[in-house]
Amino acid sequence: MKSLEIKNRILLLNIAFYSCCFIACLGNKSVEINDDTAIVSKEVHSEPIKVGANQTEKYLPLLKNKRIAVVANQTSVIFKNEQQSQYTHLVDSLLSLGVNIIKVFAPEHGFRGTADAGELIKDGRDSKTGLPIISLYGNNKKPTKQQLENLDLVIFDIQDVGARFYTYISTLHYVMEAGAENNIEILVLDRPNPNGHYTDGPVLEPEHQSFVGMHPVPVVHGMTIGEYAQMINGEGWLNNKTQAKLSVIPVANYKKVLAYSLPIKPSPNLPNDTAINLYPSLCFFEGTNVNAGRGTSKQFQVFGSPFLDKAVFEFNYIPQPNEGAKSPKHMGVICHGMDLSESETLDYLDLSYLIMAYKNTNDQSKFFNDFFTKLAGNTSLQKQIETGMNSEEIKKTWQQGLNDFIKMRQPYILYD
């Protein structure tokens, strides 16, 4: 008995010793135990994230004695504290540092970010600085040779959300293309991608290229705008396979596996982290007769339609005009649907809401519109839903394209 007792004590001491060694080896990592008791390790963020714009010491020398244009909106800021709660606009900051800014180019939603999605943006003049503002979402989406006259370099600094149909990457493409054609340098000040923790969705087919999908990438591409710019150049996607003279200032201390909360909403209808996370999944409703929360205070957090079965969808709301949605879909009409504002963070593209809505609409022949194909980047997704395929079956048809894309983008990746 004594011998058995001694052996048990030795066993317990060994277990304690190796447990201590294991914990010590984890270093600065926290440990979580999931339902299957497997150990999941996540790095603890030790240094504050520093966006490209904040690293003036790296890019001010590139601007010296040059005539500059800035592609910017309300997210183009330099933060004044680690919490990113205080900031100044990039344009204001650079002017105060003596940078010779000649003009500003404005993307969709405008320079101050208040226009509706798809609303025509007009040329104008910034009331604060007096700088001319040239719209890249009006008469032309690509800077013209005349608009680029007397410029040496264009700075691109806009917060993206990592979805193919979010049009800032299309604006990036055209700015790079115009720069390549007119021998003008392009400088991208990088920012984190709040949906950078996953990659999902069908890869766009070239015949369905549009301003809401210009490149053969999945719906959620998992790249920052700086990485994406390098991919546009490296893959020869610019006209005639030209290449822009490109520089990227990366984000410091950034890892895609870490959650990043945007301190400034990137557009009027993406007001918070939940909306940004649900956007890739719910934006498909823009190509249907279902409202995706425009005209409410929960944009891209609710969906509904007067054509959905109210016995299935007990939640309802009435879209009304508001900031970013002057004439929302089904304005003033009761919409039956779902409230997803308390949903857990997604790390995949969720088709279940789209499929559920299609199955429970009162006239399936009127559910989809022509815009859906542009958002999907193919005609097959609509057909798959119409023929009754479930999410898992549909996703299997994407997998090879996703695998090929992930391999293709690897040379351009800047962050873990």
Image (cartoon, rainbow, N blue to C red):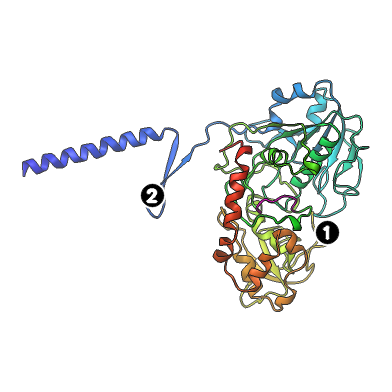
Q: Quadrant of residue 89?
A: top right
Q: Quadrant of residue 294?
A: bottom right
Which SS class for mark 1? loop
Left or right of 113 in this view: 224? left
Q: Quadrant of residue 312?
A: bottom right
Of the residues shown, which amino acid type is indicated by label 1? Lys
Numbered circle sitting on residue 385: none
Q: Is residue 72 one of those drawn in magenta?
A: no
Which sits in the foreground, 352 or 94?
A: 352
Which sits in the foreground, 409 or 341?
A: 409
**Which residue corresponds to mark 1?**
326
Per the rendered image, the range of residues in magenta is 213-219
Q: Quadrant of the C terminus?
A: top right
Q: Quadrant of the N terminus?
A: top left
Q: Which circle's residue, 2 or 1, is located before the other in the chain? A: 2
Q: Residues within 10 Å of mark 1 (few under 14, many from 20)?
A: some
In the rendered image, the vertical position of residue 261 relative to residue 314, given as above or below:
above
**Which residue corresponds to mark 2?**
38
Left or right of 205 in this view: 7? left
Q: Residue at x 75, y 21 (%)?
A: 61
x, y percentage for residue 210?
78, 54
x, y percentage for residue 282?
67, 60
Left or right of 410 in this view: 75? right
Which sits in the foreground, 415 or 336?
A: 415
